[in-house]
């Protein structure tokens, strides 16, 4: 199968969209298919593309004002040209918004079926960044996804949200986790002594440092006795967090085996963002054998079993986050039990398994097109 993956982000970017697109490309190659990636250009793209699992076509882009880690593709004929030159049988649109819209238009014009993967809560971001525009964001989401043969939602909450806003033909497609890289055996006692020299319970957050993530909700945990808060990631909110989270240690952006070592060395993982359509870092923490505290909204509802693998707390409630962390801090046996249960829950959620599910969705779309054509 010849597949063109049009993605708003791709490595060297570090985010859920880029990671999922990379894993999709890897799996397609492993299964004998022929993917091509179309993504925005970045300064470091050449080095990253050299190790990509398939060819990558880069489209000129500009940094998003105020958030330079995000690149916005400029108008370009390269998208349609790449789809045509690759002789694509299907177009995969990863979190379509700017570049994906052009990919959708090209696929429609060329008569090629398209699968749109919903990953980013753009309506939630609109509420966060401009305090309005949610209805406008949903109109754009509905317009783009309604043109696709199928939209794949990463969680049951996202699926319900899409259907409630009039997006047709929505199916569930979750995300995989690398349970070999992320595993409890990578716990590093030397790192733990470095991060918590007085033997504190280490409470970690991993992800973008941006307003929509509401990392300030960790402030209550920072004030708990015997707790050390560790923050991994970078983004536009970084400069103000030293004052907001007193005593926290900021490790910057980490990836690969280094990130896996940090995950496994945590005692508790906290995710604070209320706009997660999936929340991959929750799965990575669970694979690492770490209990999770997350908001009871969006993707975490499918991932965290309340009072079995961690705690689901009311979104944007600093006191609830603090109380959940305090409960886990006070009970090492509970932390161990929740961590073991989380590891057991995600062991079967491999990228191979969900990659095969994706290929099944492709096959169904192609079969439906064949029936219609007949």
Image: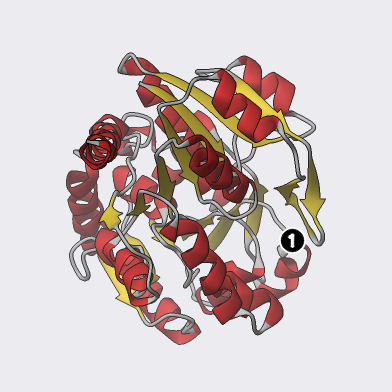
Left of 233 or right of it: where is 259? left
- Give the x, y percent position of residue 278: 38, 57
Relative to 20, does residue 46 appear above or below in the rendering?
Answer: above
Look at the image and tell me in which quarter the N terminus lies. top left
Q: Nearer the viewer, residue 4 or 8?
A: 4
Q: Nearer the viewer, residue 110 or 8?
A: 110
Relative to 367, does residue 17 appear above or below in the rendering?
Answer: below
Look at the image and tell me in which quarter the C terminus lies. top left
Q: In the rendered image, which residue does mark 1 sit on?
A: 236
Left of 155 or right of it: where is 200? right
- Give the x, y percent position of residue 58: 69, 29
Q: Residue at x 30, y 35 (%)?
A: 362
Left of 127 or right of it: where is 93? left
- Give the x, y percent position of residue 218: 54, 72
Image quarter of residue 97: bottom right
Q: Nearer the viewer, residue 34 or 327?
A: 34
The tally of labels here is: 1
Q: Nearer the viewer, residue 322 or 313?
A: 313
Q: Residue at x 48, y 69 (%)?
A: 275
Image quarter of residue 330: bottom left
Q: What colour scheme has been applied to the protein in the rendered image? A: secondary structure
Image quarter of residue 349: top left
Tell me the element at label 1.
Answer: loop
Mark 1 burial class by Cα count in 10 Å: few <14, some 14-19, many 20+: some
């Amino acid at each position: 199968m010849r597949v063109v993956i049009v993605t708003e982000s791709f490595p060297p970017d570090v985010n859920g969209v880029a990671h999922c697109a990379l894993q999709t490309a890897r799996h397609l190659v492993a299964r004998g298919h022929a993917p091509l990636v179309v993504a925005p250009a970045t300064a470091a793209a050449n080095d990253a593309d050299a190790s990509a699992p398939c060819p990558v076509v880069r489209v000129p882009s500009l940094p998003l004002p105020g958030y330079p880690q995000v690149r916005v593709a400029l108008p370009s004929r390269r998208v349609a040209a790449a789809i045509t030159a690759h002789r694509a049988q299907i177009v995969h649109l990863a979190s379509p918004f700017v570049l994906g819209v052009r990919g959708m238009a090209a696929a429609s014009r060329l008569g090629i079926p398209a699968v749109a993967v919903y990953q980013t809560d753009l309506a939630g971001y609109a509420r966060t960044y401009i305090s309005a525009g949610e209805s406008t964001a949903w109109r754009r989401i509905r317009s783009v996804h309604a043109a696709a043969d199928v939209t794949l939602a990463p969680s049951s909450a996202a699926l319900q949200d899409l259907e409630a806003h009039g997006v047709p033909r929505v199916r569930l497609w979750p995300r995989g986790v690398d349970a070999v890289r992320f595993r409890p055996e990578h716990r590093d006692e030397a790192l733990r002594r470095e991060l918590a020299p007085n033997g504190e319970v280490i409470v970690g957050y991993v992800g973008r440092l941006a307003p929509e993530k509401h990392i300030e909700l960790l402030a209550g945990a920072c004030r708990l006795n015997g707790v050390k808060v560790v923050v991994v990631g970078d983004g536009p909110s970084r400069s103000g967090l030293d004052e907001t989270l007193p005593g926290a240690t900021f490790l910057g952006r980490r990836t690969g085996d280094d990130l896996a070592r940090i995950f496994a060395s945590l005692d508790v993982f906290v995710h604070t963002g209320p706009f997660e359509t999936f929340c991959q870092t929750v799965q990575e923490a669970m694979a690492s054998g770490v209990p999770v505290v997350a908001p009871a909204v969006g993707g975490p509802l499918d991932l965290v079993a309340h009072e079995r693998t961690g705690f689901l707390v009311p979104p944007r409630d600093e006191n609830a986050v603090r109380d959940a962390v305090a409960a886990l801090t006070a009970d090492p046996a509970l932390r161990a039990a929740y961590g073991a249960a989380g590891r057991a829950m995600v062991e079967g959620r491999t990228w191979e398994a969900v990659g095969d599910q994706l290929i099944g969705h492709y096959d169904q779309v192609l079969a439906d097109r064949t029936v219609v054509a007949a």
